[in-house]
Amino acid sequence: MGNGRYKWYVVGMLWCISFFNYADREAVFSLFPLLQREMHLSLVQLGLLGSAFAWVYGLAAPFAGGIVDRVRRKSAILGGLYAWSTITLLTPLSRTFHQLLSFMAAEGLGETFYYPGSMSLISDYHGKATRSRAMGLHQTSVYLGTIAGGFFAGLIGERYGWRWSFVSFGALGILLGCVLIGSLREPRRGATDFADQRQSVEGHLNHEKVPVSTLLAVVWRTPSAVMLMGGFACANFVALVLLSWMPKFVYDRFHLSLAMAGLSAVLFAQLSSMIGSPLGGWFADLLRRRMAGGRMLVQALAMFCGVPFVILCGKTTSMGWLIVALTAWGFFKGLYDANIFASAFDVIPPQARGTAAGFMNMVGWLGGGGVAPVAIGFVAERYSLSTAISLASIVYLAAGTLLLVAAVRFAPVDTARYEHAFVSTGS
């Protein structure tokens, strides 16, 4: 298992699930103007809608990651799909801000199982030779899902009201789960890592239930993994700034329709990320053969290169220059995104990968995504949305610094320790 064409079919099936994972969460941002008018919401309240999702998503992530390391990942992934799609379908029942806030938070609980499960699953179909490419290809679903969520939510909202946007996405997600339930198969845990070490795929890694405390100790005693989490929090902060506030920024500044503002805000960045992500995966796989921190170095380069374009996104008054800035920012974001979990899995053993992915999501979404929407709303009310967006570039600088230190200083030692321990326990 894990060889041949099926390992790429797995990426394709997970791609479809991830598409709805991001379409559902992006939809609300394109609907901000409609929600603001109907419920008379402030900018901070709009920001809280995005932050509520991120807070619950992040808080539940370690719990979800621990479960993923103990149950069939197929069940966790599809169960999560049914849960968040049902919540999305029920969101139109909201009549007040607090009700809507509750549904946004509940959606985060449903979606938090997906990434620990899917990244762990892919890592057992794709070894070191193809892991970044597989995850980079999977990552393109995030970009198309964001585009679809931004555009179609705005289009449906303008024509039929914001409630029908949620009904459409929720119903389609449930239908997808019914289609895929018989096709997605569970691999052995650690199968590709044993193959990389020329060991039998029949080993105790497939069956051993490691205590959560032990798994956490593995993560927190690995300095490069901790720095990757810090970098992810910073990168996610900037991503949520642009994804949550750019539709309203474009709508207000350039006076486009709701659908076109939602599309323009995400289209150029996401399409260029679709180019950057596979390229980042290929480049990282290549560089990983030459140095232990190769994947992390690609991520650090992406963060530093993205800084001027984040500034330009907030400061430009030209739609043409905004497109240039979003396109360049999206390309470098894709380089980074392809290696979020592949970098961590270079230093984290198979038994702990669900837990590691869960904690990465917790740190990334609580420390980054959970702060960004409401923080930008707060700054925007006191200065301007333009200034708030541009200031996010400082956070990218911090991310690049953490990743560079991890790649050069800690990755060689952490990788060597992990590979030694893996061979010792696997033989």
Image (spheres, grey):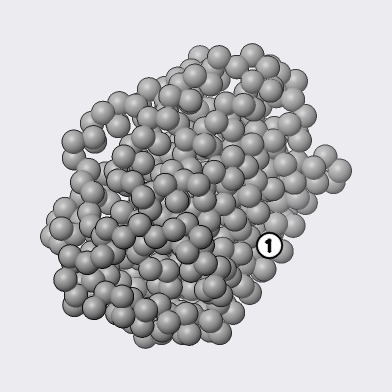
- For the residue pair 261 and 128, the one nearer the viewer reads as 128
State the count of labels: 1
Q: Residue at x 31, y 39 (%)?
A: 75
Point out the image quarter for the C terminus: bottom left
Q: Which residue ends up furthest to the left in the rendered image?
A: 4
Q: Is residue 419 left or right of residue 162?
A: left
Residue 3, image quadrant: bottom left
Residue 280 visible within the image? no
Q: Is residue 40 left or right of residue 362?
A: right
Residue linked to disc 1: 395
Q: Is residue 48 left or right of residue 387?
A: left
- For the residue pair 359 and 336, the one nearer the viewer reads as 359
> Badge 1: few (under 14), some or many (20 or more) residues near its Cα, within 10 Å?
some
In the rendered view, tell whether residue 110 sits above or below residue 116. above
Q: Is residue 286 left or right of residue 153?
A: left
Residue 265, image quadrant: top right
Q: Residue at x 48, y 85 (%)?
A: 413
Residue 173 visible within the image? yes
Identify the secondary structure beneath mark 1.
helix
Residue 307 location, x and y as percent? 64, 65
Q: Residue at x 43, y 24 (%)?
A: 86
Residue 205 location, x and y as percent? 29, 64
Q: Residue at x 64, y 64 (%)?
A: 396
Which amino acid type is marked by label 1? Val
In the rendered view, tell whether residue 316 sits above or below residue 24. below
- For the residue pair 80 and 149, the one nearer the viewer reads as 80
Residue 67 location, x and y as percent? 42, 47
Point out the image quarter for the N terminus: bottom left
In the rendered view, tell whether residue 347 sits above or below residue 243. below
Q: Which residue ends up furthest to the right in the rendered image?
A: 382
